[in-house]
Image: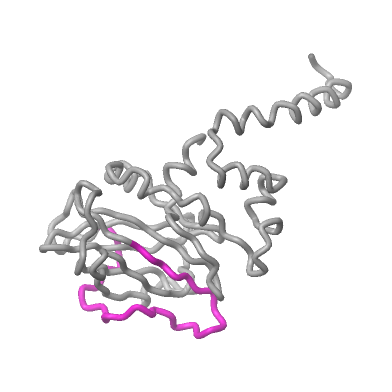
Amino acid sequence: MKNAISRRFFLERTTAASTGIALLSSTSLINALTKDASPFEGYNPYAEEKTDLRTSGFGGEHLTVKGKIFDRTGTFSVPNANVEVWHLSPNSSKIRHMAKLKTNNDGEYKFITDFPNREYGKMPRIFFKITTEDQPYYTELLITDIGAYITGKHWEENKQLKDKLFPEKEKFFILPKSGDARASFFNKLAGNATLMEQIKTGIAEDEIRKSWAPGLKAFKKIRAKYLIYR
């Protein structure tokens, strides 16, 4: 699990949305399937063209998803690509949230939607179909309360994107609405704000681990008198 977050975390830029979180995804057009062979249930080729999928009004929990489409090599962005998205509707087993949109001249797309419901035993997710020159590519974005993840399959198929699949250090962390980093969920998990600052400043993993040594040494000294077995 050591590399799970760094390899699979799908946020390239993150900002706080007024009603939820904002995500940014990256993908490329490779390993295309036949035009209508969606591997995910619920695909509707007649979805409406729109960028606002919300049905819950301003009181619900919303996601803003921004993305950029790249070619096979991960070098060039793809303008005017078709992006189709769909997901389970909130508190429902039905897929009523679906839309079509196009990338702009820089290969970017953006939409806002309600937080997806999830199938039993699975994470909430948004499904994607990306098409250019009749070449479709399917992928999915897994959603949590603190971020979003690509699947291992997406990572393997898109490794040529390299750092385009990784987060920008300055915008990787989702802050609470107050904007106070000290209250962020990441810092609660880490136990302090030090790790976040180390990541932001680009300190190497080995150096971060070395910085834990004094604290671990002190803890082991305290722990020693409570050990039953040695």
Farthest residue toward the right?
225
**Magenta stretch bounds:** 39-67
Q: How many marks?
A: 0
Direction from residue 69 to residue 92 in the image, left or right: right
Is 47 included in the stretch rendered in magenta?
A: yes
| Percent x, y of residue 33 | 16, 54
Q: Quadrant of residue 77?
A: bottom left
| Percent x, y of residue 152 | 37, 44
| Percent x, y of residue 6 | 47, 42
Above or below residue 26? Residue 203 is above
| Percent x, y of residue 221 | 83, 22
Direction from residue 194 to residue 16 in the image, left or right: left
Above or below residue 194? Residue 184 is below
Above or below residue 94? Residue 57 is below
Farthest residue toward the front?
201
Main SS of the magenta part reads: loop
Is 50 included in the stretch rendered in magenta?
A: yes
The residue depicted at 38 percent of the width and 64 percent of the height is 126
In the picture, the quarter occupied by the C terminus is top right
Q: Nearer the viewer, residue 171 or 63?
A: 171
The residue depicted at 37 percent of the width and 73 percent of the height is 111
Direction from residue 170 to residue 104 in the image, left or right: left
Direction from residue 207 to residue 52 in the image, left or right: left
